[in-house]
Image (cartoon, rainbow, N blue to C red):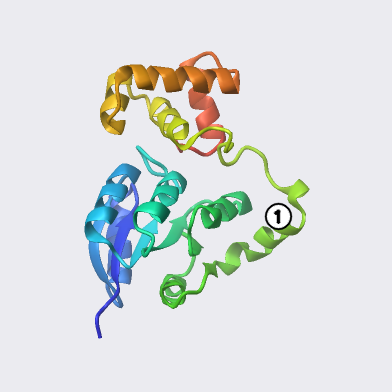
């Protein structure tokens, strides 16, 4: 029987190596990447059955990557494996197109259960946060503040915001996004206007507070 093809994304090489050993028991690992933009490229090239990804990744965080992957590789199932136990993050992940959500402190055996469930068309949420997520859904007013970035920003604005917060210059951002420097400057200006923020340092603080980057 042909093994499911899996692509993995995490910005820590040691975690990727450990995950690979676990996943390869039942699946074929077709690639590993360490940032969100590389994940987008690899997913389109490899067309995996399943993508394991983290939320906190450089260049493009996991939530933004998931939104793009849902359109670019709709047949690929997504499972988040992250340190974020927040119900808000879990809810946002499923809204972004995920089929599974686990914590990095979950038992190794739980990953196998999640992979099997998702590949059979089901959704999987780790029992470690199921109660909190249900509580958040049933009583939205009790949810935490500060995560994730408000959807008032466009997808491109959120991409620019993350790259700015990571300390990348205008030219570097333009190259990464394959747009002109003027376009980047326009997006940055609009972000500042919409958020009523007037310095790059404040933008960075905002991006960290709202979960768009873990820096």
Picture residue at 47% right of the left edge, 34% below the top: 158
Picture residue at 56% right of the left edge, 51% below the top: 92
Where disc 1 sits, the SS reads helix
Q: Quadrant of residue 177?
A: top left
Label 1 neighbour load within 10 Å: few <14, some 14-19, many 20+: some
Q: Residue furthest bottom?
A: 1
Camera-nearest residue between 156 and 150? 156
Instruction: Indicate the position of residue 22 as horizontal and vertical percent values.
Output: 32, 70
Q: Is residue 57 left or right of residue 144?
A: left
The number of numbered discs placed on residues in the rendered structure image is 1
Camera-nearest residue between 61 and 82? 61
Vertical comparison of 39 with 5: above or below: above
Q: Is residue 2 left or right of residue 110?
A: left
Q: Quadrant of residue 90?
A: bottom right
Picture residue at 25% right of the left edge, 28% below the top: 175
- Residue bearing mark 1: 136
Q: Is residue 140 left or right of residue 97?
A: right
Instruction: Indicate the position of residue 128 as horizontal and vertical percent values.
Output: 59, 65
* Image quarter hosting the N terminus: bottom left
Q: Residue furthest top?
A: 198
* Image quarter hosting the C terminus: top left
Instruction: Indicate the position of residue 93 as horizontal and vertical percent values.
Output: 52, 54
Picture residue at 44% right of the left edge, 44% below the top: 64
Instruction: Indicate the position of residue 210 as horizontal and vertical percent values.
Output: 56, 36
């Amino acid at each position: 029987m042909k093994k499911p093809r899996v692509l993995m994304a995490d910005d820590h090489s040691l975690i990727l190596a450990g995950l690979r050993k676990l996943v390869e028991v039942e699946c074929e690992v077709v690639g590993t990447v360490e940032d969100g933009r590389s994940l987008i490229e690899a997913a389109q090239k490899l067309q995996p059955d399943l993508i394991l990804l983290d939320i906190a990744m450089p260049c493009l965080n996991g939530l933004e990557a998931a939104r793009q992957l849902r359109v670019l590789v709709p047949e690929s199932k997504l499972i988040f494996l992250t340190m974020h136990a927040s119900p808000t993050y879990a809810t946002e992940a499923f809204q972004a197109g995920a089929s599974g959500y686990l914590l990095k402190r979950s038992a190794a055996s739980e990953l196998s259960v999640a992979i099997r469930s998702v590949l059979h068309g089901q959704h999987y949420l780790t029992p470690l946060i199921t109660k909190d997520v249900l509580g958040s859904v049933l009583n939205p007013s009790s949810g935490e503040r500060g995560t994730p970035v408000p959807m008032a920003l466009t997808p491109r604005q959120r991409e620019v915001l993350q790259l700015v917060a990571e300390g990348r210059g205008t030219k570097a951002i333009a190259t990464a996004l394959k747009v002109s420097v003027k376009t980047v400057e326009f997006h940055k200006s609009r972000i500042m206007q919409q958020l009523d923020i007037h310095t790059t340092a404040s933008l960075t603080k905002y991006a960290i507070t709202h979960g768009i980057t873990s820096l």
